[in-house]
Image: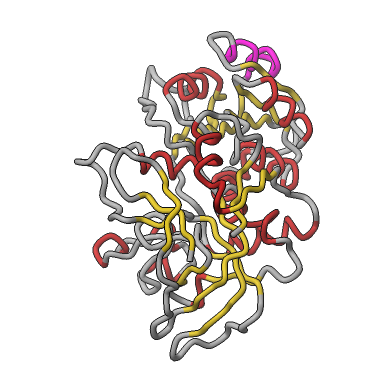
Amino acid sequence: MKAVQYREVGKGPEIVEIDVPEPGPGQIRLKVTAAGLCHSDWFVMDLPEEQYTYGLPLTLGHEGAGIADKLGAGVTGITVGESYAIYGPWGCGVCRNCAEGKENYCTRAAELGIAPPGLGAPGAMAEYVIVDDARHLTPLGDLDPVETVSLTDAGLTPYHAIKAAQHKLFPGATALVLGVGGLGHVGIQIIRAISEATVIAVDVSAEKLSLATEVGAHHTVVSGPDAAARIRELTGGVGADAVFDFVGVQPTIDTARASVAVDGYIHIVGIGGGLLPTGFFSTPFGAAVRAPYWGSRSELIEVLDLARTGAVSVHVERYGIEDAVEAYTRLHHGAVRGRAVVVP
């Protein structure tokens, strides 16, 4: 079968032929119907050799959906021929956080060598993928897998961050979205769907600011040294009650710190490598800073339910698996509007 793999540190993705995998006990094989590309893939592929820990070759694709094709021994609750989305942040399943469905915060995954598909385990950017456990599959029903697959990360990750700050998104509050890429344009929709907050979107790209308006932002601001002053102006000097940084580079983090209100929240979602010092004389009184990661299994179900109501959708660019390298190049250069999806 065809697969998109990272095979040599520093070389980027390649399209290769590999064997079709067989499911072991408790495992499920999916015939992949869609696999999403993510900036996290490039974060991994840009790591120097001494920091790379994900194994080689690595089949990419931590956003995946497919049709259940073959069940390993002992699998129950999964129907061959049905469509499923993959819950990506796999955990041990038995620690306290996993017991609450928060496998994204599993305390034993690293110790046990458990890794997400596409981020250590073989991912979904192939014709078939193995899922380790039935609990990591969520039925898609009649949702279009190509339109939906990105919600397993680009929807789940912002939903988790936004839901944790939902009490700050009261009527009259302001939510600031930094970066209107794959996650940010979904984040705007989630804020509009679950709150009455005013949304200000910030980006360097006029095209992405146009997308922000299309998906529900009330105001847009061009990213730069004057952005924080403009945000203060739009909020009557108060600042944003909740800031969601979907980029995470130092300039956006600096904008977040300069824009957050007293007793506000800053959630750094993007993995751009910037750092935010906090404490007296750094952030406003009462301001909280968090770095949330992915989301829980129950939150994925909630995100898919939002998609079923039409409240949340993803702007998708489709590519065949033979065009995956081109898609990754466009993603690396910031040319993707919304989310890129490979359709094997």
Residue 34 lies left or right of residue 23; in this view the side is: right
Between 27 and 322, the one nearer to me in the picture = 322
Between 59 and 91, the one nearer to me in the picture = 59
Q: Residue at x 59, y 30 (%)?
A: 335
Can residue 278 be seen here? no
Instruction: Reply yes or no: does residue 237 show up in magenta.
Output: yes
- Position of 75 relative to 1 (above/below): below
Can residue 84 be seen here? yes
Quadrant of the rendering where the C terminus is positioned: bottom right
Residue 250: image x %, image y %?
A: 42, 22
Between 312 and 4, the one nearer to me in the picture = 4
- Position of 60 relative to 232 (above/below): below
- Position of 73 relative to 339 (above/below): below
User: Which residue reaches farthest bottom?
Assistant: 74
Residue 121: image x %, image y %?
A: 37, 62
Q: Residue at x 77, y 27 (%)?
A: 218
Instruction: Reply yes or no: does residue 73 show up in magenta.
Output: no
Residue 308: image x %, image y %?
A: 77, 60
Q: How is the image coloured?
A: secondary structure
Quadrant housing residue 166: top right
Residue 259: image x %, image y %?
A: 56, 20
Residue 47 lies left or right of residue 322; in this view the side is: left
> Which range is magenta?
227-238
Instruction: Name the main secondary structure of what is drawn in magenta.
Output: helix
Between 298 and 132, the one nearer to me in the picture = 132
Residue 173 lies left or right of residue 58; in this view the side is: right
User: Which residue reaches farthest left?
Assistant: 50
Q: How many marks?
A: 0
Q: Residue at x 53, y 82 (%)?
A: 70
Q: Residue at x 22, y 41 (%)?
A: 49
